[in-house]
């Protein structure tokens, strides 16, 4: 058998094999075919995700998920997760997307894709109203509570060497430390600071200065260009028409940053 015939047979065999392989559907097609959008959300992160007094999912991320499902023309299915399991749930197909205070970072972008930002997680410094604090320099010799390994802790540690930074294992413990007088100041997300304010309204805690805004994106599996294009357009459109800002403001009492769509991924 000559080489031309062999090459021809190989080409035919390869063509048949390719024809037999099922086409990989974009997640957008799967969502529309199923008639529902499965969204992974941590309900232990108020005011982004929580259970209301009737034990129903609530919060700004829930409302954003409802808006996305509505714009897709499908039902919403909330997939309860925890912060460490958000990305694993997505990668194991337990959810179609993540809408759960997931910061867009360069490291995460190696594993999953993100939509354009739909919201932000702001890191700030809070203290009693009468505390004269305007910037990092005013934290000298002050006892500041932060959460070990958090974004807020990293920013705080990088910008002040003179503060007495007290590192705790979680948000609740850091808040308790401030309420008990173990620390005077809290460096954390604005959402956690709001929890502090709610627990002790008579202490008049307030945000003294903003450390950094982290862009939050809808997380999706890689290899879904049509779905990513839809999500990018969805975020852009609903930011411009004010719907995403209205959701954010109703829960955090401030507006989204004007440069939200241009915010770069965190390193």
Image: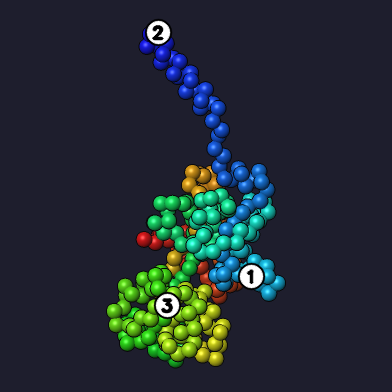
> Label 2, label 1: how many angstroms apart (C-alpha)?
72 Å
Ranked by sequence position, the earlier of labels 3 and 1 is 1
Under circle 1, the secondary element is strand
The residue mark sitting in front, 2 or 1, is 2
264 vs 243, nearest the viewer: 264
Residue 240 appearing in the image: no
- Which residue is tagged 3? 168
Q: Are marks 3 and 1 in contact (CB under 8 Å)?
A: no
Mark number displayed over residue 1: 2
> Label 3, label 1: how many angstroms apart (C-alpha)?
25 Å
Count the labels in the image.
3
Q: Can you say whether 213 is above or below 34 in the image?
A: below
70 vs 163, nearest the viewer: 163
- Which residue is tagged 1? 51
Q: Quadrant of the N terminus?
A: top left
Q: Can you say whether 232 is above or below 48 in the image?
A: above
């Amino acid at each position: 058998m000559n080489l031309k015939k062999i090459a021809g047979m190989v080409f035919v065999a390869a063509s048949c094999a390719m024809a037999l392989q099922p086409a990989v559907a974009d997640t957008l097609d799967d969502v529309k075919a199923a008639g529902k959008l499965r969204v992974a959300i941590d309900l232990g992160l108020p005011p982004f995700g929580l259970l209301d007094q009737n034990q129903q999912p609530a919060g700004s991320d829930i409302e954003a998920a409802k808006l996305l499902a509505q714009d897709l023309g499908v039902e919403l299915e909330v997939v309860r997760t925890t912060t460490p399991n958000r990305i694993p749930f997505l990668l194991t197909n337990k959810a179609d997307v993540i809408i759960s205070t997931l910061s867009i970072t360069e490291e995460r972008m190696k594993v999953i894709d993100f939509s354009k930002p739909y919201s932000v997680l702001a890191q700030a410094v809070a203290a009693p109203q009468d505390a004269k604090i305007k910037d990092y320099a005013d934290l000298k010799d002050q006892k500041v509570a932060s959460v070990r390994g958090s974004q807020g802790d990293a920013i705080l540690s990088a910008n002040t060497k003179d503060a007495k930074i007290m590192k705790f294992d979680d948000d609740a413990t850091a808040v308790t430390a401030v309420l008990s007088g173990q620390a005077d100041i809290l460096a954390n997300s604005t959402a956690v600071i709001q929890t502090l304010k709610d627990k002790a309204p008579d202490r008049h805690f307030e945000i003294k200065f903003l450390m950094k805004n982290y862009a939050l994106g809808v997380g999706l599996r890689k290899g879904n260009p049509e779905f990513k294009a839809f999500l990018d357009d969805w975020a852009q459109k609903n930011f411009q028409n004010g719907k995403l800002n209205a959701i954010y403001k109703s829960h955090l009492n401030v507006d989204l940053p004007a440069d939200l769509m241009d915010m770069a991924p965190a390193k």
